[in-house]
Structure formats: structure tokens, C-alpha cells
Image (spheres, helix red, strand yellow):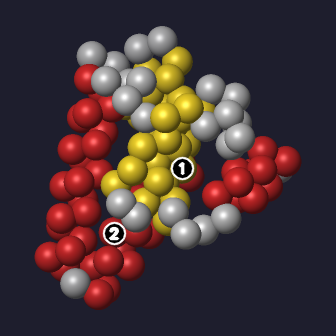
Amino acid sequence: MAEVRRSSQAEIDLETILRDLQHNASVIAERYATAFSDKSHALARFPEMGRSRPEIGHAVRSTLVYPYVIFYRVDGEVVQILRILHGKRDLQRIIREESED
């Protein structure tokens, strides 16, 4: 089983998502917290489960906790979650701008 790690930006993404959901409805926030946790466990067991996203970056994969997209890379026995973004955002632009920094 792989180890799942979140980048500092992915941690911020997750905290922001759950805080915003909590503001609207705590029950929904709890459901999403569970869904993100479940997805992390699934990635640990099946790191290649997401689809390849070469248009986003080298060796980047993605999977969903709808409507959120989890971007990650697999490096040996480590799954590195890079970002967690709402699917309606301009994902390519966000990732491209970050890689330029």
C-alpha cells in the first residue's frame, strides 16, 4: 500500500473547501471530509486509479470527489496530492501559473 501525502497547497485547498462547506452546512462538510478521506485510502491501495493528465503536467493524474478534482503524482510508494480544485475552475491555467512561479 502506498503512502499518501498532501502538499502544503493541497492542505490549504482541503481546509478552504471544508471551511466553506461548513459555513453553508456542517452535514455536507462532514460528508465531503469523509469522501476525501475515503479517496485518500483508495489512492493508497490503487495509486494508478486516476486518469493521466499530461495536459496538466508531467506524470500528473487526477481523480474526483465530485465536483472537486484531486491532482496527484505517483512516485514509487508515495502518492503526492498536489492540489484539490473545484472542477469548474480553469484548471490548466491554475496549474500552469503555479509551475511558472
Numbered disc 1: secondary structure: strand
- Residue, disc 2: 18
Numbered label tally? 2
When the figure is inspected, residue 45 is found, relative to residue 83, above or below; the finding is: above
What residue is rendered at 37% in x and 29% in y? Answer: 49
Q: Is residue 46 left or right of residue 79?
A: left
Q: Is residue 72 left or right of residue 5?
A: right
Q: Is residue 87 left or right of residue 19?
A: right
The three-letter code of the residue at mark 1 reads Arg
Image quadrant occupied by the N terminus = top left
What residue is rendered at 19% in x and 79% in y? Answer: 26
When the figure is inspected, residue 52 is found, relative to residue 22, above or below; the finding is: above
Q: Is residue 83 left or right of residue 32?
A: right
- Residue, disc 1: 83
What residue is rendered at 43% in x and 35% in y? Answer: 50
Quarter of the image for residue 5 reads top left
What residue is rendered at 68% in x and 34% in y? Answer: 54
In this view of the protein, which residue sits in the foreground, 88 or 36? 88
